[in-house]
Image (cartoon, helix red, strand yellow):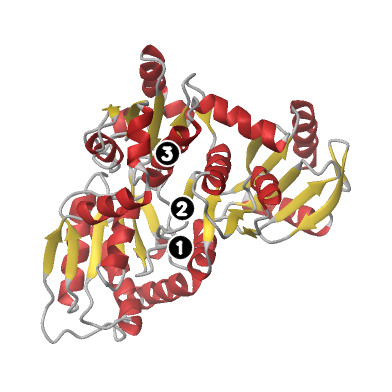
Amino acid sequence: MGSNIKFGTDGWRAIIAEDFTFDNVVVVTKAIAGYIKTKYDPSKPVVIGYDTRFLADKFAQRAAETLNKLGFNVKMTDMDAPTPVVAFAAKHLDSAGALMLTASHNPPEYCGIKYIPDYAGPATTDITDVIVENVKKIQSGDESFLPIAEKPGITEKFDPKPDYMRFVKGLINFDKIKEANIKVFYDPLYASGRGYFDTLLSEAGCNVTSIHNWRDPLYGGGMPEPKEKFLGELKELLLKNAPAVGFSNDGDADRFGVLDEKGTFITPNEVIALLFRHSLKNRNAKGSVVKTVATSFMIDKIAAKYGVKVHEVPVGFKWVGEIMRKEDVIIGGEESGGLSVLGHIPEKDGIMANLLILEMMAYEKKPLYEIVEDLKQEINVHYLNFRLDLRLTEETKATAMDMFLNNPPAQVGGYKIVKTCKLDGVKFYFEDNNSWMLVRPSGTEPLLRIYFETDSQAKLDAMLADVKKMV
C-alpha cells in the first residue's frame, strides 16, 4: 500500500482506508520531518491543521504524535480550520511550516496531507522532491536521516482564528461594505470556511445569512466544491430574497464561488479580472499581475490598459506564489478558482476573495451583474471559456501530446495559429488576437485537458469539433 504515496505541491491525497491510512500518515509525516530537520531550527514548532473530512482530526492527532516522538513541538488548531488560515499561522507563529490534513475540493471519501513552508505558500518542487525521496527511504526501511529526539516534543492546541481575523480586518474596508448594506447569503458547503467569512461580515454589522454551516464529512451528499452545480440551494435562496448576492468556499476554503443578484455563477476568470480591476481602480495597488497559462486574456487586456506587467506561469498556484514572494504582485490567480492579493500570504484564499468582491461592490455602488457588464464593455470583448477533458489511455494521451507538441496543426476550426508557447503543455494563439487553446496532460489522471478561450460561440464550436477529430 505504501508505494502508492505520490507527494506533490498539494501534498498527497488518497481514499480513506484504502491508501490513506494511519500508517501512511505516519510515513508522510516522518518524510516531512526529515525535510524540516535540514532547514529549520529544531526549537521552532510545527503547525498542524485539518478540515472537516471524516477522521481528519484523528489523522492530525497521529501526525502530531509522530512529530512529538521525533522531538518536535507542535501547535495544533483547536478545531477544523481553512488552509489559508493555517498557512497564515505558519508564517506568523515563526514556525517550521505547517502540515494541513485536507483533500480540498475532492470527493468525501478522500483525505490528504500537505506541507506548507513557513513562507505560507505552496511547497515548491525542490521541497516536495526531498519529501518524495524521504518517503521512498522510509518505505525501504531507512530512517537514519530522521532526527533523534533528546526528549519528546509536546503538542499545544491553539485558536488560529483571532490573528487571521485581525489581519483581514486591516486589509478589507468593512466600513465601506457595511455602508453599502448588501444582502449576503453564504454556503460554506458544510466545511471549514464556516465561522470566518460570515463572522467577519456579521461582526462588521453586515446583513449575512449562512446555510450548511455545520460539519458534515459527507458534504450533504454533494461535493465540497463551489461550482454552479453544487450551489443550487444558495441560488434558490438569494433569488427568493432578491436583491442579494451569494458566496461559497470549497472544503478547505482556499477556493471561492460567487453568484450575482440574478443567480448567475461568476466564473473564476471573471472574479480574478474583476478584482484586478478593483485593485487598480479603487485600492490604488501598484505592482505586477500573475496568471497561469490557463487563465483568461481578460487579465492581459486590463493590464495593457493600466500599464501593468503580466507574468504568465504554468498551471498550479505554487508558480503564482513563487513570484508573489519575490515582488509586489497586485493579484495572482488561476482559472480553477484560486487567488491572492498584494499584502496577503502567497497562498490561495477563498475567504479573502469573497470579501474583496463585496468591497468592490461597495466602491462601485452597483449590482454585481452590472459591474461584470462594465468590465466587458471596458475591455471591449466578451470571452467564452471551455475546458474539454478527454479520458484516454496513457499511450493515447502520450501520442496526442506528442502530436500537439512536435507536429501541431497550422489551424484549428479554420482559424490560423500564429504563435505557440510551451511553458506548460502547449498553448496556441490564433490570428484574431482574442482566441487561444491550451493542451496539457493531467499529472494525476489519464486525461488530456484542452482549454479554449474565444470571443464567439461559433469559433468555440468550430475549434471543439476540429480538435475532437484530431485526438
Residue sitting at x 79%, y 42%: 470
Q: Which residue is mark 2?
A: 340
Amino acid type indicated by mark 1: Gly
Give the CA separation, mark 3 to mark 1.
Answer: 35 Å
Q: Which residue is mark 3?
A: 359
- Assign a secondary structure to mark 2: strand
Q: Nearer the viewer, residue 227 or 56?
A: 227
Looking at the rendered image, the disc whose residue lies closer to the viewer, 2 or 3, is 3
* Disc 1 residue crowd, few under 14, some 14–19, many 20+, Cα 10 Å: some
* Disc 2 residue crowd, few under 14, some 14–19, many 20+, Cα 10 Å: many
Residue sitting at x 29%, y 81%: 143
Amino acid type indicated by mark 3: Glu
**Residue 192, image quadrant:** top left
> Relative to 347, is 297 on the left or the right?
right
Proximity of marks 1 and 2: CB atoms separated by less than 8 Å = no
Q: Is residue 438 above or below residue 126?
A: above
Proximity of marks 3 and 1: CB atoms separated by less than 8 Å = no
> Relative to 104, is 154 on the left or the right?
left
